[in-house]
Image (tube, grey):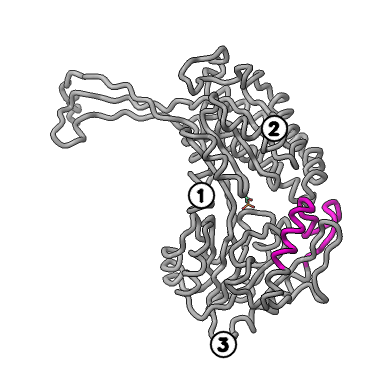
Amino acid sequence: MDCCCGVLVRGGSCCSALTLCLLDSWKRAELLKKAAAELREHATHIARVMMDEVAKPYAAAFSEVLRTADLFEYTAEEGVRVSGELQLSDAFPGEKRNKLALVQRVPLGVIVAIPPYNYPLNLAGSKVGPALMAGNSIVMKPPSAGAVTCLLGIGAIMHLAGAPPGLINVVTGKGSEIGDYLTQHRDANAVSFTGGGTGLRVAKGAGMIPLQMELGGKDPALVLPDCNIEKTAAALVKGAFSYSGQRCTAVKVIYMIEKDGELSAKILPLILEGVKKLRVGMPWEDKVDITPVIDGKSAAFIKGLVDDAQAKGAKLELPEGGWKQSGNLIHPVVLTGVTQEMRLMYEEQFGPVLPIVSVPSVEEAIELANASPLGLQASVFTQDIDAAMSISDALQAGTIQINGAPARGPDHFPFQGFKDSGLSSQGVRYSIEKKKKRKKRQRAVVAGREVQHRKRP
Ligand code: G3H
C-alpha cells in the first residue's frame, strides 16, 4: 500500500488511483462476470492446485471453483442494485416537509482481505467480489497454505478478466509479518478476515475501521429423542467429517438428549456405520472423504485433544483398535462419554473427531452449548417444530439449523458469528453493504404543491 494502490486513505487525502473508485458499477459487474467465466475455463487446473496445496479432495476442490464462479456472477447482479435512498423530513414528528436527504452509499476505499486455508478460493472470492462491487480496491493476503490457489484463482483470473492494475492486489507472506502490516496500515479502510485464534489480535491492531470477521466455531448439534434417526445420523456424519472436519461450520460436538441411553442405542450404531463407510486416503484418490489435515502441528493438536478425553474417561468408539494416523492423515474418531472436564468439549478440534455428550434435558444441553465462547452455528434435530423454534431462540449462535447440519451457504444467505465467532454478517448483499459507508447530502426544499392526479373520466 506504500505504492498507493488505494482509493481514499484513512488520513482523508486522495491518491492517484482515485480513478479506480470511479470504475463504473456496470464495468465492475462485467469484470466479475468475466472472472467467473475464466474460473470455469480454468477450473480443472485451479482445483488440482488447491488439492495439492491444502489436501482437499479433488471433487470438493473442483466444486469450490464452480461455487466461486457462481458467487461472482451473483455478486455482479446484486452489486449493481445496491444503491442509496431519498428521505423527506416530514416523516419525523414535528418536522415540516422542508428538507430532503440524499443518502448515498460510497466505497470505503482499500479493503484488506485475509481468507483462510480451508477455502482458499471461495472465502477469498466472497471477500473480493463484494468489495469490488462496492467500489473498493483490494489488497489480499492469502493463507500461507493456499497461497498459490489464491494467486491463480484470484490474482491471475482477475488479470485475465481485465482488472486494471492496482485494483486487486495479492500479497503473499506470513500472517504474523505481512498480515499485521496490512491490517494495521493507515491506508487500510476495512478488514475482512476469516481465521482462527488470531482474530482478536487482528481486530485490536486494525483499530477504528469496519471489520468483518469469521473466527471459528464449536457448533453443537442438539439431538432430541423424537428426531428422524436415519436422516439425523446421516446429517451428523456429513456435518462432522466433510473436508476432514476442517470447516468452521463442522458439527464439533453432539448433545444427545437422553436419560437412559435409549436415543444413543438407536442412533449411535447408524453414526458409526456411516463413519466406517468414509473413505480415508489421499486427496487425488477417487471418492475419498477423509484426507490429511493441513499440517503436523494441527495433527498433533487434534491428537492431544483425543488423548486428553480418553485419559479422562471418554470411550473411543472409532477407529476400531484405537487411534490411527499416518503422517497428517488421521482416521475418523468418534468418542462417547465426553464431559465438561475434557478439552474436547469446548476447544475447536478442526479435524476428523466427533465428541458425543449425553445430557438428561434440553435445558442442560442449551446451558452447556451456550457456555462455549464461540457461537457460529448450532443445529437442532427434532420432529417437533415448536420445540425446534424455542430451542433455537435460546441458543446463542448466529445461525440455527433445524434438522440439518451447519453450513455457511447458500452464499447469499446471511452468515454471522455470535460471541467470539465473529463480527458482522457475510452473504453477498450483506458483504457489499458492509464495504460501503453512507454519505448524506441534505438540502432545504421549498415545499411544493402536491401533484393532483388526473380524474378518471
Ligand atoms: O470454514 C469456514 C467456512 O465458512 C465454512 O463454509 O459451511 O460452506 O463449509 P461451509
Q: Does the rendering let one see residue 150?
A: yes
For the residue with label 1, is its CB less than 8 Å from the closest atom of ligand 1? no
Which segment is the magenta one? 278-306
Q: Are marks 2 and 3 in contact (CB under 8 Å)?
A: no
Which residue is drawn at the image coordinates 60% and 67% (left, top)? 345
Position in image of residue 212 (x %, y %): 52, 40
**Left or right placement of residue 196 versus residue 134 in this view:** right
* Residue occupying the point 74% across, 37% down: 147
Q: Amino acid at mark 1?
A: Gln
Instruction: In this rendered view, identify the residue nearer to me: 301 or 247.
Output: 301
The image quarter in which residue 265 lies:
bottom right
Measured as percent of width and height from the top left, residue 21 is found at 53, 20
Question: As displayed, is residue 412 above or below residue 444?
Answer: below
Q: Disc 1 or 3, which lies upstream in sequence?
A: 3
Asked if residue 93 lies left or right of residue 72, the reply is left
Q: Residues within 10 Å of mark 2 (few under 14, many from 20)?
A: many
Residue 302 magenta: yes
In this view, the residue in front, 454 or 364, is 364
Return the residue at label 3.
260
| Mark 1 vs mark 2: in front | 1
Question: Can you tell which of label 2 and label 3 is closer to the viewer?
Answer: 3
Circle 2 is placed at which residue position? 154
Q: Which residue is mark 1?
A: 416
